[in-house]
Amino acid sequence: MQSLKEKIQALDAEVKAVVADASADAEQFRIRFLGAKGAVKSLFADMKDVLPADRKEAGALLNAFKEAVELSYADLKAKIASSRTVVPVLDYSLPGSNITLGTRHPLRKVENQMVSIFERLGFTVATGPEIEDDYHNFTSLNMPEHHPARDMQDTFYVSKNPDLVLRTHTSSVQARIMEKQKPPIRVICPGRVYRNETISARAHCFFHQCEGLYIAENVSFADLKQTLYHFVTEMFGADTKVRFRPSYFPFTEPSAEMDISCTVCAGKGCNLCKHSGWVEILGCGMVHPNVLKNFGVDPDKYSGFAFGMGVERITQVKYRVNDLRLYSQNDVRFLRQFQAG
Ligand code: DAH
């Protein structure tokens, strides 16, 4: 009897130690104590050696131990289950989260549209340097030194000798193309230009232009008008009206500015068109014979037209952006309003 009691006490201590052990394994516990060859079973087998007088007490002791082991086993299982890391259940039927796509900058978007409209008319794209020499930006375009028209463009000067400036317009690319290519020439030249202006909603020290140049035999003002009219209807819609007003540019003669019927009020009068019903979008004209001669093109044989428009201006009219600063502030709330494309 004494030895059974001692065995139970020793096993009880073992049970308590296992239950207290954080890394305990419930199944091993069950096999060790409650299994077919487990400790409890063997204690019951030991009962046959207990003296009959002690059997009652021994039986009660053993049953109590068995119950305590079973309770410990249940405790151990519960403890292990609650300590297991919770794996989140995935619900595959939920809608996925969107991948946010970037948008194209509005100026690039409009420039791309311009390029594709003119490409369909047979124009190719040409580019030139933003740091330009005086000759290509001014002199060759019929603006010799001290010509008053130079004052129309507040120039950023880079150096005096050589005479370098930040190009004030993309007309400098016309000059570079005429220098390199013989007529027929049909190019558009999109790019960034610079002027020494105080930054405000209506002016900026850099902006973008798109220049057009067409030189061939028998090019007339009618060709210029039809080309630009086509551009306007593609860009702003078939109902848009155009008008040409006489103007002055040193590199074209005659020169004109082109207005379109206001895209906001359709001519009724609003802030965009300053209640006139018309908005100016570009300058244009027939390439001046002096400019042709500067590049060795015979003005008796060839004629051409040119035009230059502000990309910010076209974007403003098309998308009603009324502060030039928005284009360079990188505010995603502004930029996200334009779809990629
Ligand atoms: N270069 C002029 C400007 O920046 C725009 C311009 C007017 C370009 C008439 C032309 C043109 O090619 O023919 O204001």
Image: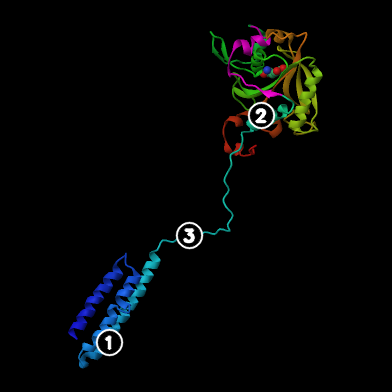
Mark 2 residue type: Glu
The quarter of the displayed image where residue 268 is located: top right
Question: Residue 193's mark?
Answer: none
Q: Is residue 149 above or below residue 67?
A: above
The percent position of residue 138, horizontal first and vertical second, equals 64, 11
Q: Earlier in the sequence, mark 1 or mark 3?
A: 1
The quarter of the displayed image where residue 271 is located: top right
Start and end of the magenta stretch?
Answer: 123-144
For disc 3, the neighbor class at 10 Å (few under 14, some 14 to 19, many from 20) is few
Badge 3 is on which residue? 88
Mark 3 residue type: Pro
Q: Are marks 1 and 2 in contact (CB under 8 Å)?
A: no
The percent position of residue 211, horizontal first and vertical second, equals 68, 21
Q: Is residue 130 magenta?
A: yes
Q: Is residue 324 magenta?
A: no
> What residue is rendered at 25% in x and 73% in y?
14
Badge 2 is on which residue? 111
Residue 203 shows in the view? no
Q: Are marks 2 and 3 in contact (CB under 8 Å)?
A: no
Mark 1 residue type: Ala
Question: Residue 60's mark?
Answer: 1
Q: Is residue 335 left or right of residue 293?
A: left
> What residue is rendered at 25% in x and 76% in y?
12
Residue 105 shows in the view? yes
Residue closest to the eye, 49 or 329: 49
Label 2 vs label 3: CA separation?
Answer: 49 Å
